[in-house]
Amino acid sequence: MQRQVHYATVSEALEKLKQQGFTIDFNIDGNHLITREQRIHHDEFEIVDVYRYEGDTDPADEATVYAIQSKEGLKGVLVTGYGASHDNASDEILKKLHGR
């Protein structure tokens, strides 16, 4: 069985993932993850790992960090508010992010 690593904070997770080559910052636009130069359709990437963080007292402190790799080998991260619905995200992207 592969050992799973958990990081104490979002900042620590982002730094460790960056050291593993997850250097691109992704955003969501409809059915795509986007960078400054590229649009990656929801069928063209996989979620490698997910880290969830809950705020002690403030729900605004809750976040999810996704480690993502495209079929072309691009590696990056997507950070969302925990349980966020993303007004500009398609149902397909939301299902993929929520593991459905």
Image (tube, rainbow, N blue to C red):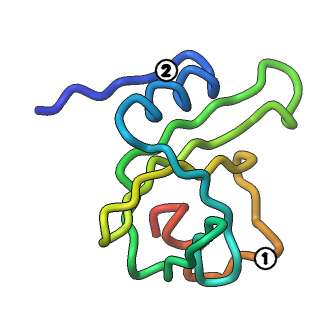
Question: Residue 68, which numbered label?
Answer: none
Q: Which residue is drawn at 35% across and 51% down?
A: 48
Which quadrant of the view contains residue 30?
bottom right
Q: Which quarter of the rendered picture does the N terminus lie within?
A: top left
- Amino acid found under the numbered disc labelled 1: Asn
Residue 20 sits above or below residue 75 on the image? above
Q: Of helix, strand and loop, which one carries label 2?
A: loop
> What residue would you read off at disc 1?
88
Q: Which residue is drawn at 46% across and 70% down?
A: 100
> What residue would you read off at disc 2?
7
Residue 12 sits above or below residue 66 on the image? above
Left or right of residue 10: residue 98: left
- Amino acid found under the numbered disc labelled 2: Tyr
- The residue closer to the viewer here, 74 or 93, is 74
Q: x, y percentage for residue 7? A: 49, 20
Q: Residue at x 56, y 75 (%)?
A: 38
Left or right of residue 87: residue 49: left
- Most extreme residue toward the left is 1
